Each structure stands twice: as C-alpha cells, then as structure tokens.
Image: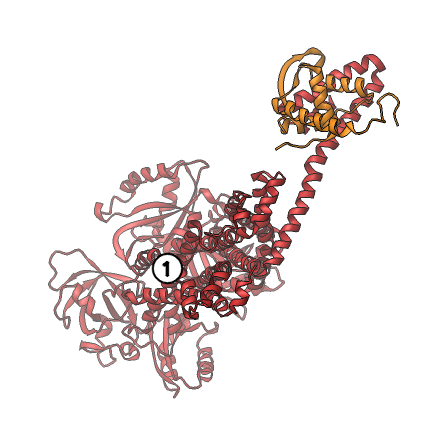
C-alpha cells in the first residue's frame, strides 16, 4: 500500500507503527460506513495533512531558526570586525597553503599511475657488493635478465628491456637533440603509451625502426606523413632509422620521459650481451608485468634460487642480488644509482604535507582561540536562548554553523589567493598544476569540502564551550577569569609558536648550509667556465677547434673531459698495484681528460708533472692521481708507482691536490686522470667576464663550422648549483611557509591580546589613575604572552635540532649547528610577538583613564 | 516551572483523562468528535500529542497489535503526575477567570 510506504518514510519505527495502525483502523471503520471511494479520499487527505505537519515542523521551523541564526551571526560579525577579519584572513591563508601543498603532493604521488596495469608493473634492480658514490644498489640490470625471468617464473607474464639514449636526430637539413629510449618489442605490452599510427606489436621488433611522439613528429615532419620516413640518429649507435609508429606525448608524471624510441635490436652491444649471455654488465633496465594478484614477496624469495642458477659464474660474495620495485613507488621512494630521472624525496613530501597540516591547524587554532575569547561576550545571548528552551545541541549546532559560515567566507578569499598564485607556483614546482583544475569544478569542490571540514573542526570546541555556559553567568558578569586564557587556549598559542620557531630554525640552518656549499673551496676554479656538450663530429676535430678558440682574446683557455667534472660518474677497478697486500681490487673514479686540464681548472700539483705533448709516452700509460687515491692504495708518495687496471700497466706521473668529484653530500673519492684528447664529451671554455654576450655569439659562430647540431652549453657554476636545486627549493618553500606560519600565529596573538586587553580596560584605567607608568602597564600586559613564547621554544628547539641534524647528516661536508641559530629564532619570534601584543597594550595604556573607567 | 500548552493540547489532555486508559489515536479522535462535533484530522491530533509527550504531561506505552490495524501495535496515552498537576493549576486559573462572567451560560450562548 502506497500510503503505508509514505508513512514509513515520514516516521521512525514506533511512530510509524502507531500512525499506520491508527489510520488503518479508522479507514476500516469508514470503509464500512461510507464505501471505498470516500474512505480512500479521506485516507489520502489524512496522509497529506500528516505530511504537511512533518514538513512544517522540520523545515519551516528549521528555516525560521536558521534565518535567526544567520541574522545573529551576521550581527555578531559586523560588531566585531577586527576578529572576523583576523579569522577569515588566517583561515584563507591556511586553506590556500594547504590546497597548494596538497595539490603538489598529489601530483608527485600520481607518477606512473597512468599505465593501465601500473600496480602490476615492477622494475628489477640489483644490489652488489661494490659501493659506488655511497650506494650499492643500482636501478639497472644485465641484458639476459628479462627473458630469464619470463622463462623461470609463471607469474611474470611480460618483460621488457630499455635504456635511455640522448641522441641527435637529423632529417634532411634539420637537426635536433632529443631525449630518447632504446627499448625491445615488448615495451608497449607493458606500458600504456597509446599508439596513434602504426602497429604497437611490431613497431620495435625490427632492426632500424624508430617510434616518435606526436610533438617530435610534428617538429620534424610538419604536416607530412612521418610513417616510413628515414631519420639519421646519432646516439648509442649511429645509423638510419625508419619511422614505424607515432605515439601520444609522454605524460609529465612518468619516471622516464622520452620523445623517441629506437628498437633495441638495432644496438650491437645489446645483441652481443644476449648472445654471450653476459650477466656481468648491468647496462640495461628491466621491467616486468606480474599476473594479477601475484605476490611479489613470494617472487622475492624464489629469486634467490634464480640467482644461484643464473649467476653461478659470480662468486657468492660478489654476486648480484635482484630485487623488485613497484613502479608506482619509484618516483617517490627510489634513490638508486643510475636512476632514469631525479626522483622526489619522500621525506620532503612528508615534511611538506606535515607543514600543510600544521598551517591549517594553526589557522583553526586561531579561530578556536578567538572564538573562545569572544564567547564570553555572548553569554547573554546564550542565556536567553537557554531560557527560551534551546537545548545544548541547538546551541552547538548554531555555533558550529557560524564557524562554517566564516570558513565559507574565507573560502572565497582562499580561492582568489589560489588562483592568483597558481601560475607562479606551477613555475616553481616545475609542473603546470593549473591544467588539471582549469576544466573541472574539482578544485572548487575540494576546497569547499576542505573549508566545511575546517569550519566544523575549528567550530566544535568553542561550540561546546559556549553551549556549556550557564545563564547565571550573566548576573555574575564573569568577573574573574574573563581576561585569563584557559588551559586549552594556552596550549594552542604555545603549539602555534613552537611550530613557527621550529620552521624558522629549519630555514636558517638550510640557508647556512647552502651558503657554506656555495662558498666552500671545492678545489678547482669554476668561475666563468662554459661547459659545451660535444658530439662525435666535434670530438673528431677537437684539436683544431681548441686552437681556434684559444686564439681568441676573450677566451682564456680550453680543455675537455669524458665526464662532467662537477659529478664524475664512472670508475675503474684497479686489480693490482705496487705494495698491495692481499686486498680486493679497488674502484677508483676515472676521468679521461685533454691537455691543460689541471692548468685550466687551477688544480695544484703536489709532485710530478701535468700531461703535456712533450711527453708522448704518457698518452699510453701515464696517469695522474689525486691525494685520496694515493692514500687509498696505501702509498706514502705516488710518483713513479705502477698499477694495473683492465689489461694496462700504468705509471703515476703526477699527484694532484684533492678536489670535489661530486656534490658535498659525498666525501672526496679516489680519482685518477687518463690522458685522452680523443675522448671528448664535454668541452670547457674559460671566458672573459666582459662582453659575455659577444663571446658567446663568437663561440656559437665558430662551433657552427664543426657541427650542424644546435649548441648545448651551460655555465659550470650553474651546473654546480643545480646539484643543490632540491635544497634551494626546499629552503624557499620552507621560508615562505615559516613566514606564513609566524604571520598566522601573530595574527592570532594580536587578536587575543586585543581581546584580553579590552577585558581589562577598567583595571588599566584604575592602575593609571593610581600612578602606574605606561611602561609598567605594557609590561603587565605582555608578560603572559612572553611566557607562552618561551614555553613554545622549549618544545621547538629540541625538535628542530633533531630534524635538522638528520637533514645535515645527508652531507659529508656540513656546518656545525650552534646555539646562535636557536637564540636568533626565539628572539625574532619574541620580538614579533611583542610587537603584536604591545600595540594593544600601548593603546589601552595611553587612553585617557576617564574613558577607560567609563568603559561598557 | 510549568510548561505552557495550546488549547488543542488542553482538549487532548482532558480527553486522554476521560478515556481512562483506553486512549489511543483512533479513540481520542472519536471522543473529540463526540464531545465537540468536529472531525479532527489525525495530523492535528498527533502534533499536540507529540508535544504533550515531550513536555512529559503524557506517557506513551506500546500495546498489543490487532488484526484490524493490519497487525500493528496500538500506542496508549496516559496522563502523568505532572500532567494532572498542571490540569489542576489550569482548572483553578480557568475557574478564577470564568467566575467573573455570570451573564454567559453554556446553554443559551452569545
């Protein structure tokens, strides 16, 4: 029966039983008397009337009360504009910060999730006994691994091999330098890079085939059909490649990016590794696709037996150990050697999220603090509401509603703030965050949800507090305690300031460390040095180019090397050396250099001589060692000593002073230099500081005759600083948020001080009349806030010390944390706290006592 | 403190008293019809009844289901101690107020 169903919706169980029963009974009576039609009409009329009654009580009255609440809320707000402004502004900043940080965090955790089976894809990395650049885990793996895993384990349903390849592409007379990949034909079976033209199953199967992204294809071919065209590629291997497919551009949130893929079978080194079943060279990257629901932990245990089977040629203590990395966690958590891109620091992400919450909580704390303080003013209203029959829950609802209204207002401001800073912020984090929001109401929906939650949370405690005020307080006027802060309020102020102090200490320490890095003597002169990437054409004619450039008056010197001096990646094992006593082979960092290298970088010699064309024998077996290398091999003096690496016997012709091979995170390692004027990957040109632009143009001009590819260059100083980019950004981010935190905390304190001072207006008047000096009054009013800030520093200092010494632990060369930082931070915060409090104190101390005594 | 009530609530409270333990939705409505001559809607009975229960002048108890009600329980209403006390106060107030007006007798009105 329909009527019954309506009643069931309208009432709770008991009332439904009663009402439905009553109606049925009366309906049955009427049915006997007046017939079905009339009874039915009557029944529906009754239902309609019941429905109206329910609506009237619940909604109409609800609306009337709501209107009253709204009116009261708006009146209260307009009467206390200062507090409302402080609250809205604080909350808006909190909301905007939170939103901005969280959208960045969300972006960082979205890496690689665009692949269809992203949670079934794993990278197989390996651990070895060899510690290299402070690490012994590498993202790479040997060539035969992918096929072997597929053969051995049923849960591995697909595997692919790839390796990055930065190459130069040439089509007709157009030249491009592009970031690319070499990958085998299973690549598209694991990764979801949709292919627009061509067949993804066969595109990478043949020798000499290449797949381009849409934007690269457009860059090269314009509107012409690229499929089947031939492109010259100069990378791992040079050759002519046929375009076999076009894919969509790679999303930014992929842990490897590329604009083209060449087929891996085209690469002879790979083919040889496969044929020779070479498990010792881990030059490749292996990705596998596991069965849905397969347990990677189980695979992990089985992989031990796999190693003993396949790596039998490696001795047990030197054997590689393979392990799986879930692909979606690579960007956040993996920091191995040979990563395909620089990954995010998970701890920083956690830290940032922490700061976001902290700032939001501080804004909420502000709200609570001021709301509690202000509630005393509303004791009359609460009293009357209670007398008239408001239940505690009505009052709680009213006050939570008020705080939600306020947070909605601040939402409007926050949205404006977010929209205003989003472009700059996107630039700063390096990803365009606005794109994902522009087309959807998502951003607003999220902010709205956040604002409601914030309103609810920050409104709840003051609401309970207010609802518990007794009407009798009206008569008593709450003479005591009204200007004192409750314990809850004190806790809020202390935690706000503790957070601000800790953040400031963090900022100062990071800044000091960065300044230390920038000013530290790293052992070579990196000023005004231009680093130019050399291609094979340049390398062939290096001597001629060097002579031509060195003849220019604005160029002071030219040299070359195989790797960047600021971060030397490769090493060589030295198997035997003079005076060896049973030690294992040692790995020394290795750098192949051109003539004049030491001279160019102003690296001092301790003994022996620099490479020179005067000693042609050095080209074969003369080497330069650094001090650490000499020490590592256990020599007192290195000059003239012999050693063996590969199948070469070398002599030490000179020992140079130590300089930094890597960032200051790592200690200086052992290094030896090999003279190889033919092995040129990087050119270094030291130029004059005057007419920089002219000199650059000149170099570009000269280079044009040697290579057709666009010139890729950078200043060595910038290359050096880029190694600390993460730290520099971190410092900027934390500075901004520390300032905002301090601002929000002070805003709250300002409001609180204004309130408590107002409560004591009469007392101050009396004191002034009785002869207290203005200074005394100001001191009286600032004393308790000073205590709170000092209490905050007690919590903040140990916390900041612990976190920051851990952070500094990541650097081999670091500053010492002195007490000065903490004193400065506390003093700075204290001064700001005083400023925000004493304005109020001064104002009330200097008002005419007559006015203060007439107050209220 | 006494909680005030409307005229409808007053009539229903008195009807409950009159029905002596057999007061539930249908019987209350029937009794009012007999006494006053108006057929009240159920909505206008439940509204005051709920208010009376909330003000604790009336107690609501679950009875037995009957077939005529589609197997649903009756809910009986019974006046409480507070309700009686309030009725006495009300009666006294009424008597006081009405005692001044002799001219009007219930039989020949206006």
From this view, report whether residue A23 is shown above or below residue A372: above
For the C terminus of chain B, the quadrant is: top right
Direction from residue A398 to residue A741 in the image, left or right: left
x and y, in percent, of residue A47 in the image: 75, 26
What residue sits 60% from the left and 48% below the top? A381
From this view, report whether residue A286 is shown above or below residue A657: above
In the rendered image of this protein, which colour is used for chain A? red
x and y, in percent, of residue A54 in the image: 70, 32
Q: Quadrant of residue A855?
A: bottom right
Direction from residue A633 to residue B84 in the image, left or right: right
For the N terminus of chain B, the quadrant is: top right
x and y, in percent, of residue A304 in the image: 29, 40
From this view, report whether residue A448 is shown above or below residue A569: above
- Residue indicated by mark 1: A787
What residue sits 24% from the left and 47% below the top? A314
What residue sits 40% from the left and 55% below the top? A494
Q: Which chain does the numbered disc 1 sit on?
A: A
Q: How is the image coloured?
A: by chain
From this view, report whether residue A576 is shown above or below residue A614: above
Specify few, some or many for label 1: CA neighbours under 10 Å numbering under 14, 14-19, or 20 or more.
few
Q: Quadrant of residue A516?
A: bottom left
Q: SS class of the residue under badge 1? A: helix
Q: Is residue A628 visible?
A: yes
Q: Quadrant of residue A638?
A: bottom left
Question: Could you say which is closer to the camera, residue A729 or residue A768?
Answer: A768
In the rendered image of this protein, which colour is used for chain B? orange
Question: Could you say which is closer to the camera, residue A631 or residue A18?
Answer: A18
Question: Could you say which is closer to the camera, residue A105 or residue B82?
Answer: B82
């Amino acid at each position: 029966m329909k009527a019954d169903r309506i009643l069931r919706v309208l009432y709770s169980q008991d009332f439904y039983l009663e009402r439905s029963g009553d109606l049925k009974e009366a309906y049955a009576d009427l049915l006997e008397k007046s017939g079905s039609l009339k009874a039915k009409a009557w029944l529906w009329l009754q239902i309609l009337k019941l429905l109206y009654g329910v609506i009237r009580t619940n909604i109409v009255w609800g609306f009337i009360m709501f209107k009253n609440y709204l009116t009261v809320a708006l009146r209260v707000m307009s009467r206390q504009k200062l507090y409302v402004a402080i609250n809205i502004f604080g909350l808006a900043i909190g909301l905007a910060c939170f939103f901005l940080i969280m959208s960045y965090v969300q972006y960082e955790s979205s890496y690689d999730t665009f692949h269809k089976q992203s949670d079934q894809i794993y990278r197989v990395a390996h651990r070895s006994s060899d510690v290299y650049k402070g690490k012994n885990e590498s993202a790479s793996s040997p060539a035969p691994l992918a096929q072997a895993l597929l053969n051995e384990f049923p849960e591995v349903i697909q595997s692919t091999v790839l390796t990055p390849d930065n190459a130069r592409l040439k089509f007709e007379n157009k030249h491009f330098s592009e970031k690319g990949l070499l990958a085998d034909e299973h690549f598209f079976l694991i990764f979801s890079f949709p292919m627009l033209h061509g067949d993804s199953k066969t595109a990478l199967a043949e020798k000499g085939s290449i797949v381009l992204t849409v934007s690269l294809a457009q860059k090269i071919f314009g509107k012409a059909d690229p499929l089947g065209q031939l492109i010259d590629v100069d990378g791992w291997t040079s050759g002519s490649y046929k375009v076999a497919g076009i894919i969509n551009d790679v999303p930014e949130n992929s842990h490897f990016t590329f604009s083209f893929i060449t087929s891996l079978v085209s690469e002879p080194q790979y083919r040889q590794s496969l044929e020779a079943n070479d498990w010792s060279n881990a030059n490749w990257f292996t990705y596998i696709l596991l069965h849905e629901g397969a347990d990677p932990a189980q695979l992990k245990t089985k992989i031990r037996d796999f190693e003993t089977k396949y790596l039998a040629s490696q001795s047990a203590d030197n054997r590689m150990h393979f392990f799986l990395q879930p692909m979606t966690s690579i960007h956040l958590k993996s920091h191995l050697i040979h990563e395909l891109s620089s990954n995010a620091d998970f701890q920083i992400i956690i830290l940032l999220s922490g700061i976001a919450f902290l700032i939001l909580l501080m804004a909420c704390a502000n709200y609570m603090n001021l709301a509690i303080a202000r509630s005393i003013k509303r004791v009359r209203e609460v009293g009357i509401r209670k007398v008239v029959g408001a239940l505690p829950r009505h009052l709680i609802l009213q006050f939570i509603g008020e705080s939600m209204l306020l947070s909605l207002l601040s939402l409007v401001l926050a949205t404006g703030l977010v929209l205003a800073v989003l472009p700059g912020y996107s630039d700063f984090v390096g990803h365009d965050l606005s794109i994902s929001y522009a087309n959807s109401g998502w951003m607003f929906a999220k902010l709205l949800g956040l604002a409601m939650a914030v309103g609810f949370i920050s409104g709840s405690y003051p609401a309970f507090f207010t609802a518990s005020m007794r009407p009798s307080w009206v008569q008593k006027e709450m003479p005591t305690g009204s200007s004192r802060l409750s314990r809850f309020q004190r806790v809020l102020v202390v935690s706000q300031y503790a957070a601000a102090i800790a953040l400031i200490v963090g900022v100062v320490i990071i800044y000091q460390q960065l300044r230390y890095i920038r000013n530290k003597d790293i052992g070579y002169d990196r000023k005004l040095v231009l680093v130019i990437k050399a291609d094979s054409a340049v390398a062939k004619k290096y001597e001629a180019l060097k002579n031509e450039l060195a003849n220019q008056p604005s160029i002071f010197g030219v040299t070359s090397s195989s790797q960047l001096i600021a971060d030397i990646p490769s090493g060589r094992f030295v198997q035997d050396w003079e005076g060896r006593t049973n030690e294992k082979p040692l790995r020394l960092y290795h750098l192949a250099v051109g003539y004049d290298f030491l001279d160019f970088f102003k690296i001092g010699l301790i003994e022996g001589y620099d490479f020179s064309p005067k000693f042609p024998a050095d080209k074969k077996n003369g080497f330069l060692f650094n001090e650490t290398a000499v020490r590592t091999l256990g020599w007192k003096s290195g000059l003239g000593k012999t050693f063996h690496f590969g199948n070469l016997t070398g002599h030490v012709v000179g020992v140079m002073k130590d300089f930094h091979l890597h960032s200051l995170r790592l200690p200086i390692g052992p290094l030896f230099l090999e003279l190889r004027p033919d092995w040129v990957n990087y050119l270094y040109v030291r130029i004059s500081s005057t007419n920089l632009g002219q000199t650059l143009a000149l170099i570009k001009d000269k280079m044009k005759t040697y290579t057709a590819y666009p010139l890729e260059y950078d200043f060595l100083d910038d290359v050096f600083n880029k190694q600390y980019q993460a730290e520099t950004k971190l410092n900027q981010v934390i500075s901004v948020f520390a300032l905002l935190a301090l601002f929000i905390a002070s805003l709250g304190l300002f409001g609180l001080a204004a309130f408590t001072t107002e409560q004591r207006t009469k007392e101050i008047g009396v004191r002034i009349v009785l002869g207290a000096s203005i200074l005394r009054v100001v001191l009286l009013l600032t004393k308790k806030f000073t205590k709170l800030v000092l209490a905050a520093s007690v919590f903040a200092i140990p916390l900041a010390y612990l976190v920051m010494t851990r952070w500094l632990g990541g650097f081999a060369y670091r500053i010492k944390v002195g007490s000065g930082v903490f004193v400065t931070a506390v003093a700075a915060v204290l001064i700001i706290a005083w400023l925000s409090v004493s304005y109020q104190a001064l104002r009330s101390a200097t008002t005419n006592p007559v006015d203060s005594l007439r107050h209220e | 403190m006494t909680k005030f009530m409307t005229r409808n609530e007053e009539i229903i409270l008195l009807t409950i008293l009159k029905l002596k333990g057999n007061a539930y939705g249908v019987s209350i409505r029937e009794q009012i019809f007999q006494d006053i001559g108006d057929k009240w809607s159920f909505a206008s009975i439940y509204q005051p009844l709920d208010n009376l229960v909330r003000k604790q002048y009336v107690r609501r108890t679950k009875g037995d289901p009957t077939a005529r009600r589609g197997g649903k329980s009756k809910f009986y209403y019974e006046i409480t101690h507070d309700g009686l006390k309030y009725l006495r106060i009300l009666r006294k107030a009424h008597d006081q107020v009405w005692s001044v007006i002799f001219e009007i007798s219930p039989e020949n009105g206006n």
